[in-house]
Amino acid sequence: MYAAETWKISKTDMKRIEAFEMWIWRKMKISWTAKVSNSEVLNRVRENSCIISTINQRKRRWLGHVLRHGVLLRDILEGRMTGKRTRGRKRLQLMSNICEGYETAKKRAELTDV
């Protein structure tokens, strides 16, 4: 999870991460011959799916840090770059998979600026 706050995570990547996490829980706690659903595995280990939530939490914390400081990275995240827009399909954005919207996260970060 090194530098997870800067990862661009697509839906397929999220599915792979969740599958990897379930594979780990199954290897640690449940026999390979047992036919157990994913929700039952999580109930047995008393955990929620936590890798994705940890990544999102780190992204929110990093975004708040960047927004509280007036640096070039803030301008890049807000799209204040000069020049022509690139051709083709819009790229996957860095902050596209944070649960709340960018504006809400920005307001929350500005409120904590003390």
Image (tube, helix red, strand yellow):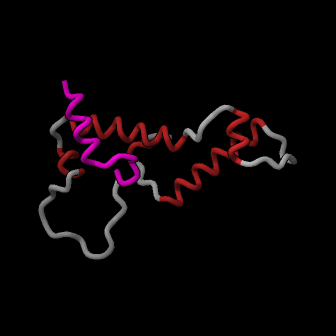
Residue 10 colored magenta? no
On screen, residue 49 above or below 79: above
Magenta-drawn segment = 95-114
**Residue at coordinates 31% horizontally, 68% vertically from top-left?**
90
Residue 105 colored magenta? yes
**Left or right: 51, with 59 as reference point:** right
**Left or right: 26, with 69 as reference point:** right
**Residue at coordinates 15% horizontally, 58% vertically from top-left?**
81
Q: Nearer the viewer, residue 111 or 78?
A: 111
**Residue at coordinates 34% horizontally, 51% vertically from top-left?**
95
* Percent of width and height locating residue 2: 47, 40
- Furthest residue in direction left, as rendered: 82
**Left or right: 39, with 94 as reference point:** right
- Quarter of the image with the C terminus is top left
On screen, residue 33 above or below 57: below
**Number of numbered tags placed on the structure image:** 0
* Percent of width and height locating residue 72: 18, 46
On screen, residue 111 above or below 39: above
- Furthest residue in direction bottom, as rendered: 88
Q: Nearer the viewer, residue 2 or 15?
A: 15
* Percent of width and height locating residue 76: 21, 52
- Furthest residue in direction top, as rendered: 114
**Residue at coordinates 84% horizontally, 41% vertically from top-left?**
31
* Percent of width and height locating residue 33: 87, 48
